[in-house]
Amino acid sequence: MKSALTLASTDVASVEDIDRAWMGVMGTDIGPFGIMDSVGVDTVWRIVDDAAQTSGKKDLEKNAQLLKHYVDAGRLGVKAGAGFYRYPHPPFKQPGFLEQRSQ
């Protein structure tokens, strides 16, 4: 999860492309951002923010900022109907998701 968040928070790759890569390589039906949506973005933010404050690591602080943006927007994940994806029909559950590429 940390690596996925770091890739997204540093604009190396999009949420969708990170999930696509994970799902393709690991052979799973859900990627790290879909998992975070399932757990609750607010819960993940609390954990990451605490780790960032405790360690003082800049990468964790940047990851916490990314998550806080979603929390502040009310995009808490599945329980709110939106997080990194919109529910109940997120794109990663749609046919062809693995073959798509973000622009």
Image (tube, rainbow, N blue to C red):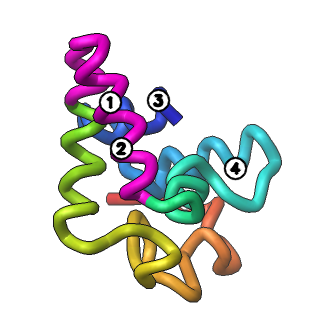
Of mark 3 and mark 4, the one earlier in the sequence is 3
What amino acid is at disc 4? Met
Residue 46 is marked as 2
Q: Name the residue under label 4.
A: 23
Q: Is mark 4 on a helix, strand or loop?
A: helix
Badge 2 marks a residue whose secondary structure is helix
Identify the image quadrant of residue 95.
Answer: bottom right
Residue count near mark 1 (Cα–Cα under 10 Å), binned few <14, some 14–19, many ≥20: some
The disc labelled 2 sits on which kind of residue?
Arg
Say which of marks 1 and 4 sits in front. 1
Tell me which residue sits at (55%, 78%) in the image.
90
Dot placed on the residue nearer the N-terminal end, 3 or 1: 3
* Residue topped by disc 3: 2
Bounds of the magenta segment: 41-61
Write down the quadrant of residue 61 in the picture: top left
Reading the image, the residue beneath label 1 is 50
Distance in Å between CA atoms under marks 1 and 4: 28 Å
User: Decide: marks 2, 1 in contact (CB < 8 A)?
Assistant: yes
Viewer-side label of 3, 1 = 1
Residue 39: percent from the left, percent from the top?
A: 56, 58
Magenta includes 57? yes
- Looking at the image, is mark 4 or mark 2 earlier in the sequence? 4
The label nearer to you, 3 versus 2, is 2
For the residues marked 3 and 1, what is the alpha-carbon distance in whole angstroms? 13 Å
